[in-house]
Image: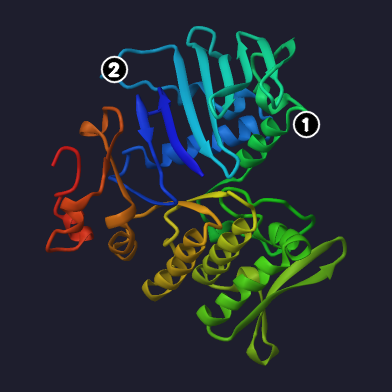
């Protein structure tokens, strides 16, 4: 589980620290930095776990340009990750050159229970074995993660498990308009907008059928007459149709946006829950859903979190979510006049014990760092 995220100089996140719990509801006005938090986690995953190069994962445009603060040439982030084995601590410092429009890894390190697994400074890397004794020293590409670059070996299994855990960070901004009917190959994970849902669904059917069955069982209760998703071969591709009572079937794209969103959301929570220690970040999951559809899905997500099958972070302003989650899991983000750095307020007893609901406190402007 992600225990702490710290970043300095990523967009509006300046000297910013977030300590998410098993379930976190992130709230705040537009432009307060909510999406920046999710984008940071996604960039970190792509850089470390996918091996994406620095100039692709962390654009130079992501460096903070806030007019109210001194302009720094560095971006620094830290991630504390708790597992059943122990606690990982990852640190990355990126150096920017505004003049050359380039960036490079200045420092990168990984520790386990306070002892080193990897360190690099300006291209000189030192690997440590699982017993923390020194391993090989070697030069590193300044545009690449050393942690991500290193291949699995018998004596660095902890570093490998850290990368596997980072790969289990899922950031989603659902867009049912982009979801296709046709799949030409399996995909081990959905894209951020879940446009490749049917590709991922094919993979789940083959590799994690229990997740497909769990999501189908719930969907049968939530979409009237729904029975299953079925794929029909069409040349080298497979075309997905939704099967309803009476053997009626419809192309997946012919379902309503809300139905496609529901299928994606239920598939998502059960598919991700099959990956031990996953962190699921969903930006406004209630989009496209009717009011009665939100609570059952939220109940299902809550149960998975309670069973320790996943960690979840949600961005939402929906009254149902706010009133259900904010009192125990709410985090409020805000910026001064939309031009200063993002600041964090934890929703605490003052808001939870108020005589009116939390969504009403928000609508009246009574929650916020400037309130």
Which colour scheme appears in the figure? rainbow
Q: Is residue 57 visible?
A: yes
**Residue 262, placed above or below residue 73:** below
Counting other residues with Cα less than 10 Å from the Cα at mark 2, is it few (<14), some (14-19), or many (20 or more)? Answer: few
Are there few (<14), some (14-19), or many (20+) residues within 10 Å of tag 1? few
User: Which residue reaches farthest bottom?
Assistant: 246
Q: Nearer the viewer, residue 85 or 76?
A: 85
Marks 2 and 1, Cα distance to the nearest angstrom? 42 Å
For residue 53, above or below residue 197:
above
What's the mark number on residue 161? none
Q: What residue is pinned by disc 1?
A: 152
Residue 265 location, x and y as percent? 54, 63
Q: Tell me where residue 154 appears, x and y as whole percent.
A: 80, 31
Q: Which residue is mark 2?
A: 69
The C terminus sits in image quarter: top left
Indicate the quadrant where residue 253 lies: bottom right
Task: Evaluate whether residue 12 shows in this view.
Answer: no
Q: Write the residue at 18% across / 60% down.
A: 360
Considering the numbered disc 2 on the image, is that residue within a helix, a strand or a loop?
loop
Left or right, 1 with reference to 54:
left
Residue 15 sits in which quadrant?
top left
**Which residue sits at x=14%, y=63%?**
356
Mark whose residue sits in front, 2 or 1: 1
Under circle 1, the secondary element is loop
User: Is label 2 in contact with label 1 (beta carbons under 8 Å)?
Assistant: no
């Amino acid at each position: 589980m992600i225990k702490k995220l710290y970043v300095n100089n990523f967009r509006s996140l300046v000297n910013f620290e977030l300590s998410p719990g098993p379930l976190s509801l992130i709230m705040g006005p537009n432009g307060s930095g909510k999406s920046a938090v999710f984008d940071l986690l996604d960039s970190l995953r792509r850089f470390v776990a996918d091996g994406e190069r620095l100039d692709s994962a962390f654009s130079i445009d992501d460096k903070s340009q806030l007019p109210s603060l001194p302009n720094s040439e560095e971006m620094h982030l830290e991630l504390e990750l708790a597992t059943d084995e122990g606690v990982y601590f990852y640190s990355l410092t990126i150096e920017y050159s505004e003049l050359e429009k380039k960036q490079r890894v200045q420092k990168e390190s990984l520790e386990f229970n306070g002892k080193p697994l990897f360190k690099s400074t300006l291209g000189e890397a030192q690997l440590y074995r699982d017993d923390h004794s020194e391993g090989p020293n070697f030069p590193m590409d300044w545009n690449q993660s050393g942690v991500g670059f290193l291949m699995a070996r018998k004596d660095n299994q902890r570093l490998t498990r850290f990368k596997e855990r980072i790969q289990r960070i899922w950031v989603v901004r659902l867009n049912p308009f982009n979801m296709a009917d046709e799949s030409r190959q399996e995909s081990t994970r959905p894209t951020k907008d879940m446009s490749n849902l049917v590709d991922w669904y094919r993979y789940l059917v083959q590799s994690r059928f229990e997740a497909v069955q769990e999501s189908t069982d719930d969907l049968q209760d939530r979409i009237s007459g729904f029975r299953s998703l079925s794929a029909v071969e069409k040349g080298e591709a497979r075309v997905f149709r939704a099967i309803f009572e009476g053997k009626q079937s419809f192309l997946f794209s012919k379902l309503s946006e809300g139905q496609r969103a529901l299928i994606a959301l239920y598939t998502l929570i059960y598919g991700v829950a099959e990956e031990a220690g996953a962190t699921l970040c969903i930006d406004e999951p209630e989009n496209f859903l009717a009011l009665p559809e939100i609570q059952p899905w939220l109940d299902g997500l809550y149960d998975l979190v309670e069973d320790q099958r996943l960690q979840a972070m949600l961005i939402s302003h929906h009254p149902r979510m706010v009133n259900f989650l904010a009192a125990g899991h709410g985090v409020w983000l805000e910026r001064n006049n939309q031009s200063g750095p993002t600041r964090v307020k934890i929703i605490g007893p003052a808001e939870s014990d108020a005589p009116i609901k939390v969504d009403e406190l928000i609508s009246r402007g009574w929650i916020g760092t400037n309130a």
